[in-house]
Amino acid sequence: MLLLSPTRLEAPFLKGRAFSFHGRAGLRGEGWVWLECGIGKANTAATLAAFTQRRRFERVLLFGIAGAYPEAGLALGECALAEREIQADLGLKDGGMKGMGFPTLVVGGQPYHNRFPLDKAFTAELKQQLGLPAKQFLTRDLVSENPSEARQLARKWEAELENMEGAAFAQTCLWLGLAGAELRAVSNVAGVRDKSQWRLRQAVEALERQVLRIIGS
């Protein structure tokens, strides 16, 4: 299994043999490989595509912290799996890529515009194993800067968690035929930029519990 997280700060609990891939930190463990994919969509897509070009993995898991929209029903420190990822800043402001008349990706004759599903079987297995809910995740390069903006995005896209990498991960997995799943722990309320109200340590501890269960450590 390939494990990805945007930063090393989200995976301090993983122990293994260190390596580097084009400047990205990596670890090799028993039955898994972890790689820092970088923050943002471009970093994530490029790192995943480059690393899997000559290496085959049965499954790929992206994990990290996220901001939860107020009506998501998730408290700080709680985890959720992505059922679907939404690419919210591509295409027309009100119509996305469908409004432009172009798909973002076509796989097996199926067009995808701004919404990308994660692997159903892998996600369902993790949902049962971990007892976690599956939610609609939203990805933007620019995070919500205030509660009003966060509420508008949540309503417009019917989303529940906000992050900066997931849609690129889901799209790349679809394109390359990788079974991908995504796990996020809530570190803050989306739109709240006062980091004194964030719970980073609590979120990373939640990631630790769930990721170690997944890899059997």
Image (tube, rainbow, N blue to C red):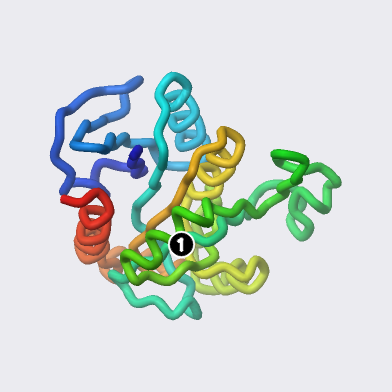
User: Would you say 155 lies left or right of 191 here?
Assistant: right
Depth order, front residue of 136/119: 119
Q: Measuring from the top left, give residue 48's x and y in whole percent.
A: 45, 32
Amino acid type for the residue under numbered disc 1: Ala
Q: In which image quadrant can residue 2 be found? A: top left
Q: Measuring from the top left, give residue 84's x and y in whole percent.
A: 56, 59
Q: Residue at x 57, y 68 (%)?
A: 159
Classify mark 1: helix, strand or loop.
helix
Depth order, front residue of 119/112: 119
What residue sits right under mark 1 in the picture?
A: 124
Q: Residue at x 48, y 50 (%)?
A: 164
Q: Extreme right residue here? A: 101
Q: Is residue 17 above or below residue 8?
A: above
Q: Residue at x 83, y 47 (%)?
A: 100
Depth order, front residue of 141/177: 177
Q: In which image quadrant can residue 208 be found? A: bottom left
Depth order, front residue of 97/116: 116
Q: Measuring from the top left, give residue 33's x and y in whole percent.
A: 28, 34
